[in-house]
């Protein structure tokens, strides 16, 4: 074999090897992206199922508290802690750019409202209002309005979690 033939054979071999490695890299990247997307989707579904259970319990607590206020009972206790509501996988879903694959921007806005209304620390207001009611510092209609507002926020969060779960599960 002459030098030119060896040079051409080496160039063809290098080109084919490089092309094959690029194709292999592309397939590997596609597989990893699909695996990550499925993992994020499953984690978000789990988080929404968890949030639905937590919010249902919170809704029951608020409704029980409203019933006790209606009965003029001062021996009520309400402890809501919104830090137990899952947010991590929602943020990861957003950070990896998957949110636009599943939701319209209006739905994303509604999702953000849910996360803000039931955000960490927002439960302190209603807990303090119940404490004021127990100590006789506020009127019945004030605590009733506060509890109904909290109930509305929890129902909204519950509806959003069910909507997100349904939407993500259907795609």
Image (cartoon, rainbow, N blue to C red):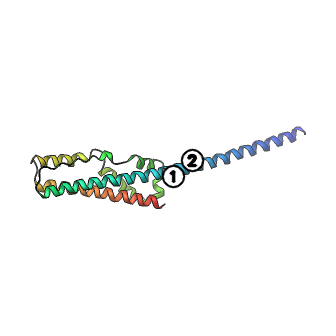
Residue 150 placed where, x, y %? 23, 54
Front residue (pair 35, 27): 35
Does the residue at mark 2 contact the one at mark 1 (Cβ under 8 Å)?
Answer: no
Look at 83% across and 42% down and name the residue there. Answer: 9
Res 110 → quadrant? bottom left
Reading the image, the residue beneath label 1 is: 38
Q: Position of residue 46 (x, y in %)?
A: 42, 52
Secondary element at image label 2: helix
- The tally of labels here is 2
Q: Quadrant of the N terminus?
A: top right
Q: Which residue lies at the image location 40% right of the left edge and 57% below the top edge?
A: 164
10 over 104 or under it: above or below: above
The Cα–Cα distance between marks 2 and 1, rounded to whole angstroms, is: 10 Å
Using the image as rendered, state which of residue 131 and residue 109 is in the foreground: 131
Residue 24 is left or right of residue 51, and the answer is right
Classify mark 1: helix, strand or loop.
helix
Q: Residues within 10 Å of mark 1 (few under 14, many from 20)?
A: few
**x, y (%) of residue 128?**
18, 46
Direction from residue 88 to residue 79 in the image, left or right: left
Q: First in sequence, mark 2 or 1: give its number.
A: 2
Q: Classify residue 120 by image quadrant.
A: top left
Q: Is residue 63 above or below residue 128?
A: below
- Left or right of 83? Residue 73 is left
Query: Disc 2 marks which residue?
Result: 32
Q: Residue at x 35, y 58 (%)?
A: 160
Q: Which mark is residue 57?
A: none
- Structural crowding at the residue carrying mark 2, measured as other residues with C-alpha within 10 Å and reported as few (<14), some (14–19) or many (≥20): few
Q: Residue furthest right?
A: 1
Residue 147 position in % (x across, y down):
20, 55
**Nearer the observer, 125 or 106:** 125
């Amino acid at each position: 074999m002459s030098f030119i033939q060896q040079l051409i054979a080496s160039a063809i071999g290098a080109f084919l090897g490089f092309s094959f490695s690029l194709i292999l890299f592309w397939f590997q990247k596609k597989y990893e992206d699909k695996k990550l997307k499925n993992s994020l989707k499953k984690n978000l579904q789990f988080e929404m199922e968890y949030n639905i259970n937590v919010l249902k319990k919170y809704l029951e607590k608020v409704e029980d508290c409203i019933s006790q206020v209606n009965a003029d009972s001062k021996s009520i206790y309400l402890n809501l802690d919104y830090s137990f509501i899952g947010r991590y996988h929602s943020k990861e879903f957003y950070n990896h750019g998957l949110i636009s694959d599943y939701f319209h921007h209006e739905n994303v806005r509604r999702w953000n409202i849910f996360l803000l209304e039931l955000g960490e620390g927002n439960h302190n207001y209603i807990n303090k209002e119940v404490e004021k009611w127990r100590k006789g510092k506020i009127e019945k209609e004030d605590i009733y309005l506060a509890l109904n507002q909290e109930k509305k926020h929890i129902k909204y969060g519950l509806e959003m979690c069910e909507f997100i779960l349904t939407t993500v599960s259907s795609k």
